[in-house]
Amino acid sequence: MPTTKKENVYFGLMMCFGMVVFMTFYNLFTHDLLGRISLSEILTQLILVFIIAALLELFIVGPVAKKGAFSLPYDKSKKVFVILSLAFCMVSGMVLCMSLYGLLNAYISDSLIGESLLENYFSLLFKNFIFAFPLQLVIVGPLVRYVFVKFVKERLKSSLS
């Protein structure tokens, strides 16, 4: 886990990148857009979404989620509880914000289904959360923690020496 501000930025960007890649392809799949849009459009979308998600994670959702997660009543000496509460708060905040981005994107491209904006938002919110939370807990979170500890944290330590 990150211990310095610099490590926290690297860790957040790594986590954000992993989630953006998976969530982008999940949303392309659920909206039947895989194969319909070009690789350059997918890459453009990935870059744009990563920038938005990274800014949200670093400056808004991340600080609020950490404050919220650490204010919950649980045994903070147990790493698994810390990871679960942070994951829940981060995923909840990011899904709330990024589903709004998805709704705006769908509205601009005139691809909303006949439901109201609110119904579309809650539908997106539900679909994104049920995919993002297990994704964070089972795949992206453990992978990013492993890569961070194995490569990034060691390099940052050796560069300080």
Image (tube, rainbow, N blue to C red):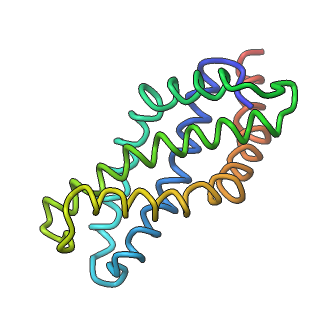
Q: In which quarter of the image is the C terminus?
A: top right
| Residue at the (78%, 28%) spot, across then down | 74
- Pick the residue in front: 154 or 126: 126
Q: Residue at x 47, y 29 (%)?
A: 58
Residue 65, horizontal then vertical, whole percent: 55, 30
From this viewpoint, which residue is outermost toward the top?
161
Q: Position of residue 76 (x, y in %)?
A: 81, 25
Q: Which residue corresponds to the image point at 70% horizontal and 27% vertical from the top-left?
A: 2
From this viewpoint, which residue is outermost toward the right? 78
Residue 8 position (above or below residue 16): above
- In the image, 107: left or right of 70? left
Q: Name the residue furthest bottom.
A: 35
Residue 69, image x, y percentages: 64, 29
Question: How many numbered callouts?
Answer: 0
| Residue 28 found in image quarter | bottom left
Image quarter of residue 109: bottom left
Residue 107, placed above or below residue 142: below
Residue in the picture at 37% in, 64% down? 123
Question: Is residue 91 found left or right of 36 in the rendered image?
Answer: right
Quarter occupied by residue 54: top left
Say which of 141 and 100 sits in front. 100
On the image, the x and y values in percent for residue 36 come to: 28, 83
Q: Does residue 34 lie above or below 72 as drawn?
A: below
Q: Is residue 142 left or right of residue 60?
A: right
Quadrant where the N terminus sits is: top right
Q: In this view, does 23 lie above or below 144?
A: below
Q: In this view, does 127 lie to the left or right of 112?
A: right
